[in-house]
Amino acid sequence: MTRRARKIATYCMIGSLALMGGTKTAYASAGQPIAGITVLLNDISINPEIGAREISNILDPIIEYQDLAIANVANYVNIRSEANTNSKVLGKLYNKAAATVLETEGEWLKIKSGNVTGYIMSDYLITGIDVYPLVDKAKTSLAIVKANILNVRSKAGTNSSVVTQIPKGQIFEVLEENNDWVKISVGDKTGYVSADYVDIKIDLKQAISIEEEQAIIKLEKERQGMQESKKVSSLRQQIVNYALRFKGNPYVWGGTSLTRGADCSGFTQSVLKNFGIYIPRTSRQQANGGRRVSINNMQPGDLIFYRKNGVVNHVAMYIGNGKVIGAASRKEGINIKNYNYRTPYRVVSYINR
């Protein structure tokens, strides 16, 4: 093909782009159609040295990036359901993330990025011919999560603490690749994930939908809840283990010594006191304090109270598996029994976790 023929073909291709209209119109930063095509046509027509490669270099970015927008913000810009700031937020487009411009509506652009389609004010986006030199710089390494739930750790190692968790299918920017670990950005957090559980690709960042963001938040709340539960279980188990150390020691009416002798309420008071939990002295007073718990919801470390002739006269500590430990009598001393060896009257918890 002669240079003249190539130029004619180029005119036809660019002309076709210009006539597509609608979603195929390129926009400048101010949201107006660019005059770049005309400039390029003039350049090609007056410069006889422009060859096929140069023409391809001109056309390729026009064809590929004619509808591309790149976020130019400090952190992120909201994607809204309608072209106004009062409408619902559908997602977030972080700085240097890309979107496809679908149409304009005044000062707003309708865009699609990732799983989000909505509106962003044009002031927050770089569009049109200004996009072309930024594309390569905006491309980055992205990690696609393969595991159902993936731990993000504070350091590159399974012994380090978990910063947060991320669900399968979501994509995050890669900050570093270090042997078997990948450092990624998750919202305002950073951390490390095992390279075995992510796929890496080079591409433009996309928007994150509110649903995707909420999925991460939900996982984080569940993780924190499990951690809190483990802390609770740990404290309660420590209390029970401590109480069991004094099994077999004597019962002494009015006593509070776990070694030399204690009565029922002196035993429970002294065990909890060791953990900084201070409760009243007598079983009747202890029964009227704390937080009431149903039999079905009692946990190790809770106190079970018993009555005689309608009056509370005994207390023991629940240790799990239907058992209690307590200072029963002079004959039995501190021992273990079934929680219902007498009819329970009330269960009270003095453990606030």
Image (tube, helix red, strand yellow):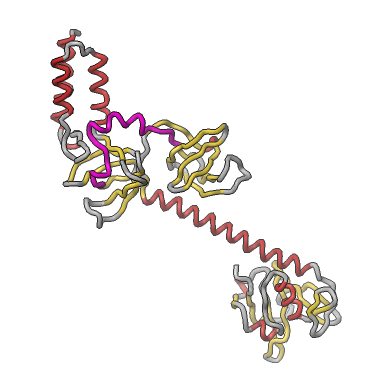
Residue 286, compared with residue 129, is above or below; it is: below
* Left or right of 126 on screen, residue 317: right
Q: Check the picture and name the quadrant holding the C terminus.
A: bottom right
Residue 136: x and y in percent read 35, 29
Q: What residue is drawn where x is 71% and y is 85%?
A: 282
Residue 50, compared with residue 329, is above or below; it is: above
Q: Check the picture and name the quadrant holding the N terminus.
A: top left
Q: Residue furthest front?
A: 74
Q: Residue furthest top?
A: 2
* Left or right of 115 on screen, residue 59: left
Q: What residue is drawn where x is 69% and y is 67%?
A: 320
Residue 249: x and y in percent read 84, 74
Q: Residue furthest bottom?
A: 309
Range drawn in magenta = 119-142
Residue 285, compared with residue 186, is above or below; it is: below
Residue 333 sits inside the magenta stretch: no
Residue 290: x and y in percent read 61, 78
Name the quadrant containing residue 133: top left
Residue 202, compared with residue 300, is above or below; it is: above
Residue 81: x and y in percent read 26, 51
Residue 133 sits inside the magenta stretch: yes
Name the quadrant containing residue 296: bottom right
* Left or right of 24 on screen, residue 272: right
Q: How many marks?
A: 0
Q: What residue is drawn where x is 22% and y is 38%?
A: 29
